[in-house]
Amino acid sequence: MKQYALSNLRISSNLLSFETYQQEMYKLPVLDLRNIRSRFPNLFDLHSLPDKQKNEWTEMLQWGDSPPPKHNDNWAEEFAEVLPEWLTGLEERPSEEEAFELLLIAQQLLHSRIEESGKAEAATWYERILRVLCRHEFKLTRELIEQRAMLIASNKVEC
């Protein structure tokens, strides 16, 4: 059996001590730190990061600990003015995807409006959209439409 010398090869352990690991970690980009923190949440404290990394961490909402913006329950109100125009376009050129989008807007308006005139207007829009979706080209019943709209609204749609 022949033995070869390893003259040009430097062998070092990839296992670092805890202290060395902590020191090396603060040299990593924030994306790598996020990955490490997702796997080992107690490995390091965010407050102990150097200022540069701490700023980078908090500036990026999807990576940092900043909460997302608060949900606005009246998000559909901004579409109320243009909804009748969109409905006219939908009735002329029906599209299933667009109809479900408008159905969810009308449904939200129906539930969020307080005054009776606003609720009646939203109910009329809702019924118009249901009539479009009940057309023969979509082959949907009212029950299927409402079931699918509920799944879409709860984000449980399976592909």
Image (cartoon, helix red, strand yellow):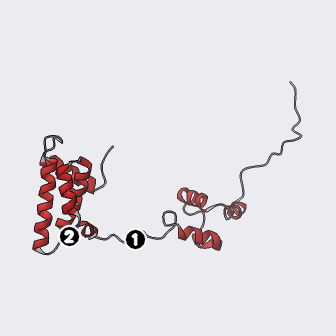
Q: Residue at x 23, y 47 (%)?
A: 96
Judged left or right of residue 143, residue 20 is: right
Of the 4 image quadrants, the one containing the C terminus is top left
The quadrant holding residue 103 is: bottom left
Q: Of 83 and 76, which appears nearest the observer? A: 83
Whole-percent x, y for residue 126 in the image: 15, 59
Q: Quadrant of residue 27?
A: bottom right
Q: Which mark is residue 108?
A: none
Q: Position of residue 22 (x, y in %)?
A: 68, 63
* Depth check, front residue: 74 or 40: 74
* Contact between labelled residues 2 and 1, with CB atoms less than 8 Å apart: no
Query: Counting other residues with Cα less than 10 Å from the Cα at mark 1, is it few (<14), some (14-19), or many (20 or more)?
Result: few
Q: Quadrant of residue 3?
A: top right
Q: Is residue 45 visible?
A: no
Q: Secondary structure at mark 2?
A: helix
Write down the residue under mark 2.
112
Between the residue at mark 1 and the residue at mark 2, the CA separation in whole angstroms equals 20 Å
Q: Secondary structure under badge 1?
A: loop
Left or right: 55 in relation to 70: right
Quadrant the N terminus occupies = top right
Residue 63 screen position, x and y as percent: 52, 63
Residue ID for mark 1: 69
Q: Is residue 147 visible?
A: yes
Query: Which residue is rendered at x = 69% and y = 60% of the image?
Result: 21
Q: Amino acid at mark 2?
A: Ser
| x and y, in percent, of residue 123 in the image | 12, 63
- Using residue 9 as the reference point, say whether residue 17 is left or right of it: left
